[in-house]
Image (spheres, rainbow, N blue to C red):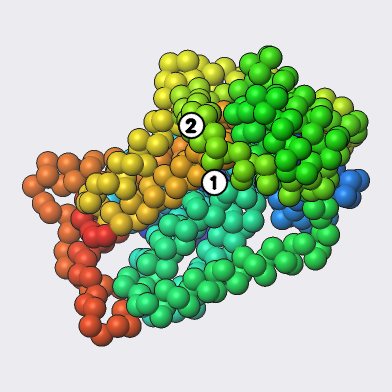
Amino acid sequence: MSGTVNRWTAALRRGWQDGTLWPWCLAALAAACGYAVATVFHPGYLSADSNTQLWQALGDEPVNDWHPPVMALAWRLLIRITGDFSAMAALQAAVLWGTLWVLARLVWKKTGSRALSLAVLAVGFAPHIMNLTGVVWKDVHLAYALLAVFAIALTVRDLPRDRTRTRWALLVLGTLFLVYAALVRKNGIPAAIPVFALLILAAWPAPGRRRWLAATGVFAAAVIAGSAGVSAVTAPLTTRVYAVIPVDDLAHVLTPAQMRTAAEQAGASADLRDRLVTTATTCQKWHITSDAYLQCFPHDRPFDVTYLDRHADVVVRMWMRQMPRHWKGYAEYRGRVFTKLLFQSNQVFWNGTHVNAGARLHPEVRKEPLNDTLRFALQNYVTGFARDLPMLFQGWFWLAVSLVLVLRRRWPGPYARELRLIGASSLLYILAYLPTAPESNYRYVYWPALSGTVALTLVATAFAARRRAATSGTSGTTDEPDTRPAVLPAAVPSPVRAARPETAASIPNSSGHPPYS
């Protein structure tokens, strides 16, 4: 027995010294951190949106497409498997910390630095990231799904050529995450496009035109099939929620008199005409600058999610006729809402459970109240940073970060191209809100904040590793063959990359009810 213990002790000591044990230590630490975060948020912080979707997931209300049916379906499956609605918030924490573990492991393999790999895990505790980790929101699902694809792509990029099955399994998993991201947030497709390119380039460093076309076709087919499958299972009520954007524009650009004339010219019913006039009057009287459909539009009780579906054609027709005539007012209004989103984002911390006026909190939620001690501790942590470092919670900062990531041609470390693509994803996502932002809300920039934080962390680890190598007087790299998949077009040479041994001291350069949306 003593000899066995000694052998185990010696093996553990060797594993610690040569680094083979450290990835498992990172995994254990990530699991512990994820469990702690899930405990803080248990059973999950609900917004008005997620409260509505919980009713749908439990089958107590019909599913509608105002909010993503795919999220209601995923929640329903989780509840059937676990018997507890809190599984969704726990799953969010698991996905985030699992992804951070993958990224931390990659940094460890590139740098051989325990401190730098721990810095990647620390991203999960950043106040502007942790504040929404346990809030069941589609914005959070989009962010974590895209980050998971990013980690999968970096893993595929470094796989040896002979790991064909593993590569294809990871590509399928990455595609599933991408499809979910595209379905869970209506404006998530612009953000998903660069991440899709990142995944393809990780598998094939220089794909030809045919491969690009084939991959794009597969992705588009997967999104269409996924959407059709979700619709077939959930049979959601049609809401045509996109019409809230024209209502917002019309109410803030036209005067009440102009609104009445525009409605009559577009053939609106008397009921819709009067409601639109009331909307414009209310918003302008009380200086409500956005979110007109929910804040100013007179609704029936209970809230009718299908009202817009019956009148969307007229509203869109009004918008198409009036906005070109009032283009200056439209540009000014959209500029006003967008700048408010960039510089005055609210909702930096979601304080538990909330329902809209006239809605009811689900009885299952009332059975599991939040831990007020942990909730207020988290709130103090987040709001303290929001006071001292407000830029972390503001869109302009993450817009600037994404621009820098995109415009700089080379970054230290092996992920220069990947950093540019992740920056492009954030940039497109923020800019997509220029004509569509319904209000100013931090959750609308959560994906740029998460991706920007991860990107800055990877850049910082690369700089630190390079400085460490310079201090030691070694390059920290050796030559090794490229382990990425072969490039099919013979005319395009495979990129030559320096080796990255697991204990390398540096990272070499490379090329490259009312619901709301």
Q: Nearest the camera: 58 or 291?
A: 291
Describe the element under mark 1 as helix, strand or loop: helix
Which residue, given by chain and number where applicable, does mark 2 sit on?
328
Q: Quadrant of residue 133?
A: top right
- The spot of residue 358 in percent (x, y) is 87, 27
Q: Residue at x 43, y 57 (%)?
A: 194
Residue 211 visible within the image: yes
- The spot of residue 222 in percent (x, y) is 61, 69
Give the farthest residue toward the left.
473
Q: Give, as a three-letter code, the residue at label 1.
A: Ala
Which residue, given by chain and number where applicable, does mark 1 sit on?
143
Q: Residue at x 67, y 28 (%)?
A: 258
Q: Give, as a three-letter code, the residue at label 2.
A: Lys
Give the farthest residue toward the bottom.
490
Q: Earlier in the sequence, mark 2 or mark 1?
A: 1
Q: Nearest the camera: 172 or 21?
A: 172
Density class for disc 1 (Cα within 10 Å; few <14, some 14-19, many ≥20) is: many
- The spot of residue 308 in percent (x, y) is 78, 43
- The spot of residue 416 in percent (x, y) is 28, 54
Q: Quadrant of residue 49?
A: top right
CA separation in Å, label 2 and label 1: 34 Å
Describe the element under mark 2 as helix, strand or loop: helix
